[in-house]
Image (cartoon, grey):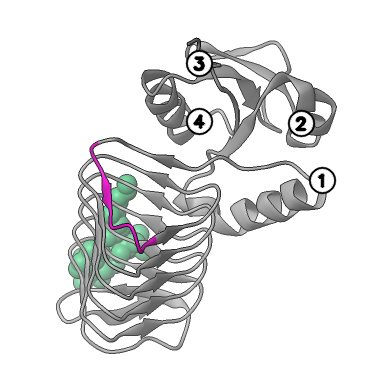
Amino acid sequence: MNQKIKKAAIIGSADLALHMAQYLSAGGYEIAGLFDDFRKPGTKAGAYTVLGAIDDIISHKGRFDEVFIGIGYNHLNKKSEVSEFLISNGIITGTFVHPAAFAERSAVIGSGSFILPNCTIDKAAIIGRNIFMNPNCCVSHDSVIGDESFFGPGAVVSGKCKIGKRCFLGAGSVIKDNIEVCDGVLIGAGAVVTKSISEAGIYAGVPAKKISR
Ligand SMILES: CC(C)(COP(=O)(O)OP(=O)(O)OC[C@H]1O[C@@H](n2cnc3c(N)ncnc32)[C@H](O)[C@@H]1OP(=O)(O)O)[C@@H](O)C(=O)NCCC(=O)NCCS
């Protein structure tokens, strides 16, 4: 039986968007095109064509089945805005879990999330919308990750944690079990978070301390 090839549109045309396009292509998607406010329609980004600015996606609805938001960790507020825009226009974000990632069957992965190889999402973990997870990350049992948060490679969230929206967890960072992190927190590479964080800002080191707003 012939399986229909899914068509994906990607918002963004920089490195992250192209990286996502490669994973999606390897996973059997056809890339319909990219939408980016900073490149003219018709221009190429890597092997892919920019079809228009982000708003233009509405008039291209028939050309794709799913949309992925390829906006990186420096612009997580923008990613939230785009997500709201897509929802309000009835456009569905796709969810991509690489076949070499493992999600326990009681875990929930929200629409728009993108999970790369060797990630483990354990029992009853809840991954929100539009989370990007680089390879080798772990979200342990019963933890909750807020929408649009972004994981650097190898970031670990231990059991029963609650991570807010639009957080960035740097490469190799570790959140100890039973920790709460509020919205908009940036955790430096290699940091170990041993106490809950209730104020947005940048935290780094072992144990993690606030280094700036
Ligand atoms: C934490 C981070 C965001 C800080 O960046 P920044 O605001 O530009 O800060 P700076 O590089 O100016 O460093 C400020 C101070 O914090 C220290 N610092 C920076 N990052 C640190 C880290 N990860 N761990 C410990 N200390 C760190 C610096 O040594 C410097 O200390 P000093 O003032 O004594 O010299 C950044 O260093 C970082 O770790 N980013 C994550 C990178 C990553 O994981 N990328 C993966 C992408 S997929």
Q: Which residues are magenta?
A: 100-107
Tell me the mark number nearer the camera, choosing from 3 and 2: 3
Residue most extreme to the front? 1
* Label 2 secondary element: helix
Q: Residues within 10 Å of mark 4 (few under 14, many from 20)?
A: some
What residue type is disc 1 on? Asn
Any part of residue 208 in sight: yes
Sequence-wise first label, 1 or 4:
4
Would you say residue 102 sits in the magenta stretch?
A: yes
In contact (CB < 8 Å): disc 1 and disc 2: yes
What residue type is disc 4 on? Ala
What residue type is disc 2 on? Ile
Residue picked out by circle 2? 57
Sequence-wise first label, 1 or 3:
3
User: How far apart are the alpha carbons under marks 1 and 2?
Assistant: 10 Å
Residue picked out by circle 3? 3
User: How far apart are the alpha carbons under marks 1 and 3?
Assistant: 28 Å
Residue most extreme to the left? 206
Residue picked out by circle 1? 89
User: How far apart are the alpha carbons under marks 3 and 2?
Assistant: 25 Å
Q: Residue at x 25, y 39 (%)?
A: 117
User: How far apart are the alpha carbons under marks 3 and 4?
Assistant: 30 Å
In contact (CB < 8 Å): disc 1 and disc 4: no
Any part of residue 213 in sight: no
